[in-house]
Image (spheres, rainbow, N blue to C red):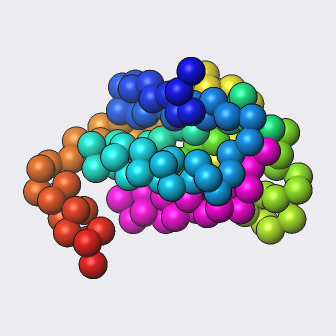
Amino acid sequence: MEMFERQIGNGYIIEMINLSSATFSEAAKFKKQLETDIDLGYKVIIVDFSNCSLLDSAFMGVLVITLKRLLRLNGTIKIVKPGLFSNPILNLTGTIEIFELYESVDNAIASISISSQNNNDSTPIELDQLTLANQH
């Protein structure tokens, strides 16, 4: 089983975290995966932590950085099943408040509005601009 599994939906992408612990050692690879999702034009990313019981600050940092980038593009990250690890890290730092949290992938998908899906048609020019912005 892969550490991260990608499922493409209609205007959104689901990233399943298949790790019991999401830590520094996997954070860089996950960051690259999320950057690819955005470069492909996805503005709504659902991150499913149903199989994960531990999240460290490095992995959380990847989520925060990605959320900031998506917000500039009128996008978002929706987090599924953060309950197992949300109290120690997310609540203590207040980080939990910046993410949309859901109990299931189905609930996260249902929350995606029609307008979010329609705003997902990125042009190659926008992707080029994103690439240039990432190089600076």
Q: Is residue 50 left or right of residue 70?
A: right
The residue at 42%/63% (across/down) is 69
The answer to which of 115 and 52 lies nearer the viewer is 52
Residue bounds of the magenta highlight: 54-75
The answer to which of 42 and 109 lies nearer the viewer is 42
- Magenta region, main secondary structure: helix
The residue at 15%/59% (across/down) is 128
| Residue 86 in picture, x, y percent from top left | 82, 49
Is 48 placed above or below 92 here? Answer: above
Q: Is residue 74 left or right of residue 89?
A: left
Q: Quadrant of the N terminus?
A: top right
| Direction front: furthest residue | 25
Q: Is residue 97 visible?
A: no
- Residue 63 counted in the magenta span: yes
| Residue 84 in picture, x, y percent from top left | 84, 39
The residue at 68%/45% (across/down) is 22
